[in-house]
């Protein structure tokens, strides 16, 4: 039984998120929130994450009076939803203050505190969750379309070669964000068997005793919840494949020992996290022409598209250093992946 999992290392993140953020700006404008720039969702998201890190109450879902799970359920999706709501409320607030000042023939700066407070309440109650969700849906849809447009040229051929070399292999995606190859219908969907997502599988991971939100992680073993779920799904898919073959009276393959390989570009999360759960690991450290940005964290830099705080970056860098010795193989081009996978499945390694 062989299982290969990967994160979103099959395309460059920066241009994909840039185009998704442009879709966010367009959707906001379509709903009447004009003048909001693509970079605004990133800036708002960064402020929200800083507030969360400082234990400042952030209204991620204004339709809920209280949410006891809020400290552990603030993920990339909810941060973006909160950022969208924040920009909407700011727009409505400024519009309302300007209208009030014009009606009273005065300047906005001269409005009293009670008036401003009333306008803030007006802004909060005017924004409806369905509109926030609609803008987010536009962002997410474009994110998947952009990912398909920006797939690395050797990504699909590499996966197909792995499947050809290993006919019974199960291939899955593991992500803490919204990247889902099963939604990339024109490219990756036919090549993947399952996806494990922190955001989509939250009901499952909350039941795991080692559940931990990624922004609070500072040790690799704290990532085990998502990889344990990936292993579970991988084994379920393999069992279903065997069952289908039996029902179709197909000849069963010889019993193959369970082997799991995880492929990713993040030393901390991909290598460190997967290795703690028994995976053989492949670090995708691509050549500069690929436009990969994951290595910036090793240099102590936050990619422009990231909302990671300085404290989170520090923990991330420390985890990356601790994961160095857990790399089983390293590739610089995706075309090298089939050969490396074959070596790992046969018990060999270049590291």
Image (tube, rainbow, N blue to C red):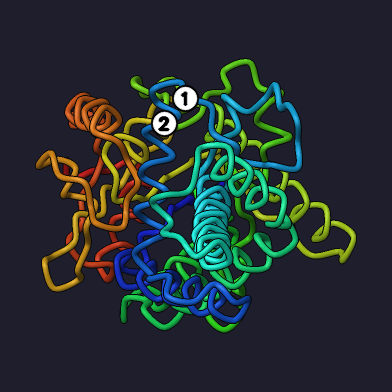
Left of 146 or right of it: where is 341?
Answer: left
Q: How many marks?
A: 2
The quadrant in which the C terminus is found is top left
Q: Secondary structure at mark 1?
A: loop
Q: Nearer the viewer, residue 318 or 71?
A: 71
Q: Where is residue 198 drawn, in percent x and y?
A: 58, 41
Separation of marks 1 and 2 at Cα, in angstroms: 5 Å
Q: Where is residue 159 drawn, in percent x and y?
A: 44, 69
Q: Nearer the viewer, residue 103 or 12?
A: 103
What residue would you read off at disc 1? 56
What residue would you read off at disc 2? 51
Q: Where is residue 224 drawn, in percent x and y?
A: 50, 26
Residue positioned 17% across, 49% down in the render: 295
Left of 338 or right of it: where is 101?
Answer: right
The quadrant in which the N terminus is found is top right
Sequence-earlier tag: 1 or 2: 2
């Amino acid at each position: 039984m062989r299982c290969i999992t990967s994160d979103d290392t099959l395309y460059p993140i920066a241009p994909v998120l840039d185009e998704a953020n442009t879709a966010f700006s367009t959707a906001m404008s379509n709903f009447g929130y004009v003048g909001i720039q693509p970079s605004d969702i990133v800036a708002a998201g960064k402020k929200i994450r800083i507030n969360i890190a400082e234990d400042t109450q952030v209204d991620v879902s204004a339709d809920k009076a209280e949410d006891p799970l809020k400290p552990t359920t603030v993920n990339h999706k909810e941060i973006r939803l909160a950022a969208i709501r924040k920009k909407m409320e700011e727009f409505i607030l400024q519009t309302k203050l300007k209208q009030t000042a014009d009606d009273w023939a005065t300047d906005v700066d001269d409005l009293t505190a009670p008036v401003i407070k009333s306008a803030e309440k007006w802004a909060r109650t005017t924004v409806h969750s369905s509109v926030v969700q609609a803008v987010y849906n536009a962002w997410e849809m474009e994110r998947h379309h952009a990912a398909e447009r920006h797939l690395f040229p050797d990504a699909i051929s590499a996966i197909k070669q792995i499947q050809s070399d290993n006919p019974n292999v199960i291939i899955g995606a593991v992500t803490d964000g919204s990247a889902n190859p099963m939604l990339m219908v024109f490219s990756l969907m036919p090549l993947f068997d399952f996806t494990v997502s922190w955001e989509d599988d939250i009901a499952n991971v909350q039941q795991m005793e080692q559940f931990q939100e990624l922004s609070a992680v500072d040790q690799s073993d704290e990532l085990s919840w998502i990889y344990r779920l990936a292993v579970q799904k991988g084994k379920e898919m393999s069992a279903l494949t065997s069952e289908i073959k039996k029902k179709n009276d197909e000849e069963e393959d010889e019993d193959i020992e369970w082997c799991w390989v995880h492929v990713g570009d993040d030393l901390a999360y991909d290598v460190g996290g997967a290795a703690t759960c028994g995976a053989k690991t492949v670090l995708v450290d691509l050549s500069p022409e690929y436009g990969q940005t994951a290595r910036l964290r090793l240099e102590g830099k936050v990619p422009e598209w990231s909302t990671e705080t300085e404290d989170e970056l520090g923990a991330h860098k420390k985890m990356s250093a601790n994961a160095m010795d857990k790399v089983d193989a390293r590739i610089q081009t995706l075309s090298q992946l089939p050969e490396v996978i074959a070596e790992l499945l046969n018990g060999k390694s270049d590291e």
